[in-house]
Amino acid sequence: MKLTALVLTLPLGIAGAVALPVLADAKPVTLTTTLNSYGGDGAYLAIYVTDPQGKIHSTLRVAGKKAKYYKHLSAWSRATGGRVDGTTGASVGSGQTLKFSVEIADALIDAGYEIRIDSAVENDRDVPVDVKAPLASSNAGKPIPGKGYVKSFTFTM
């Protein structure tokens, strides 16, 4: 009986070892966010991925170091409780550009996922979902306008 269990388990273990790298395939993606010129302090940004139902899948980046202001990134903050599972960095100033690269799982591309950006500026208004960009190969390299502080957003793969 133990030999039968070993014979059945061994092929499954090998199949799992072969399938695992396929699940882990990811593309390097460069994200570029350019802000409009505005008067005021640097903008806080939450850049995150949502699933096809609009629920947060993961946070890619939060620009702005003071966690007490994360609540103003309202759509992202409400969904995550302000918990950061991505990287953080300095806020982004008026007219400036934030550019960084991440690895995004191939399974998320062309599968209904979106990259979203919430923005906020101290002593000014908050803009939940300033940008909504379908994570689709056909959108790569195409500038997507924001509706608030973000002038344009692009991603390349």
Image (spheres, rainbow, N blue to C red):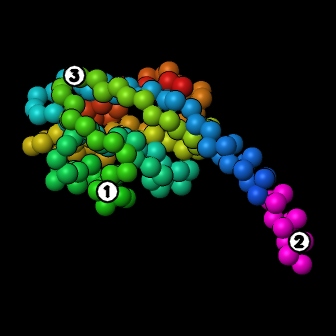
Measured as percent of width and height from the top left, residue 119 is found at 27, 40
Measured as percent of width and height from the top left, residue 25 is found at 62, 39
Overall secondary structure of the magenta section: helix
Q: Are marks 2 and 3 in contact (CB under 8 Å)?
A: no
Tell me how far mark 2 sits from mark 3, CA to CA: 68 Å
Q: In this view, does 54 lie above or below 25?
A: below
Viewer-proximal residue, 27 or 116? 27
* Viewport quadrant of the C terminus: top right
Q: In this view, does 138 lie to the left or right of 8?
A: left
Determine the residue positioned at 85% across, 76% down.
2
Q: What residue type is labelled 2?
A: Leu
- Determine if residue 26 is in view: yes
Name the secondary structure under disc 3: loop
Name the secondary structure under disc 1: loop
Measured as percent of width and height from the top left, residue 91 is found at 20, 35
Q: What residue type is labelled 3?
A: Gly
Tell me how far mark 2 sits from mark 1, CA to CA: 48 Å
Determine the residue positioned at 53% across, 50% down.
51
Viewer-proximal residue, 108 or 23? 23
- The segment highlighted magenta reads 1-12
Say which label, 2 or 1, has the lower sequence index.
2
Measured as percent of width and height from the top left, residue 9 is found at 81, 65
Label placed on residue 83: 1
Which residue, given by chain and number where applicable, does mark 3 sit on? 95
Q: Which of marks 3 and 1 is in front?
A: 1
Q: In this view, does 122 lie to the left or right of 34?
A: left
Viewer-proximal residue, 133 or 66? 66
The answer to whether residue 107 is magenta is: no
Q: Which amino acid does label 1 sit on?
A: Arg
Q: Is residue 15 above or below residue 111?
A: below
